[in-house]
Amino acid sequence: MKVAVIPARGGSKRIPRKNIKMFCGRPMIAWSILAAQQSGLFERIIVTTDDEEIAEVARAWGAETPFVRPPELSDDYAGTTEVIAHATRWLQDQGVSVTAVCCIYATAPLIRPEDLARGLELFESGDWAYAFSVAEFSPSVYRAFQASAEGGVSMLFPEFFTTRSQDLPVALHDAGQFYWGLADAWTQGLKVFDRHSTPVCIPRWRVQDIDDMDDWIRAEMIFKQLMSDQRQ
């Protein structure tokens, strides 16, 4: 069985109630639930949360909330791997034979069903523990600087000072949308960002972390443009 697990705790600080705040006409989490539904890939779509209001919204949009996430996995320090592992073990304890678990973030309104399908295809194309969404850094991380205490700057990678931009290594970052994983990989706590994982590349213009209101506004602008393009 393939299962989607959407983590959505209630204690968001920088954007209060972020997971269920209205985003382009729907609660934020609804977009992730709908993408999972429209993909047709999952036998079950589960939201793991410690918050009853979030649970109610999730159920209203067709997801399951079969358990309450424990407090020790609901604070600011709880890692995604532990949260997904908890949900996976819960399913296994119910006698469910779980073959793959896809973590989908609740704050990923730019996610597309076809990306989830492509992720599954890559995940199953080799002996991978995980397949997860990534995007290329822009501009290149190899051109990055850091400020010194004295007020000057220094390159993080001075060895690339004279390298042409087109010759720089391609650097990827987590796109923060979805993470396919073997049930055992989650429960054993295997790191996602490692050699046993394969990247699923998403276009840079369709990737946006949503950590503060500037991010939120930018994500809404991208989303509205994408919707407008689809209607034309």
Image (cartoon, grey):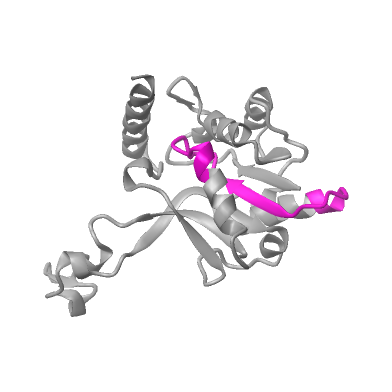
Residue farthest right in this picture:
95
Q: Is residue 7 visible?
A: yes
Q: Is residue 39 magenta?
A: no
Q: Is residue 78 visible?
A: no
Residue 89, x across and y down, in percent: 78, 55
Q: Is residue 113 magenta?
A: yes
Q: Is residue 203 above or below residue 23?
A: below
Displayed quadrant of residue 34: top right
Q: Quadrant of the C terminus?
A: top left
Residue farthest bottom in this picture:
159
Q: Is residue 105 above or below residue 191?
A: above
Residue at position x 60%, y 49% in the image: 103
Residue at position x 33%, y 47% in the image: 204
Residue 16, x across and y down, in percent: 48, 34
Residue at position x 49%, y 39% in the image: 107
Relative placement, left or right, of 117 versus 172 is right
Residue at position x 53%, y 37% in the image: 113
Displayed quadrant of residue 124: bottom right
In this rendering, the count of numbered labels is: 0
Q: Which residues are magenta?
A: 91-115
- In depth, the one of 72 and 217 nearer the eye is 217
Residue 20, x across and y down, in percent: 54, 29
Relative placement, left or right, of 57 versus 67 is left
Relative placement, left or right, of 115 versus 50 is left
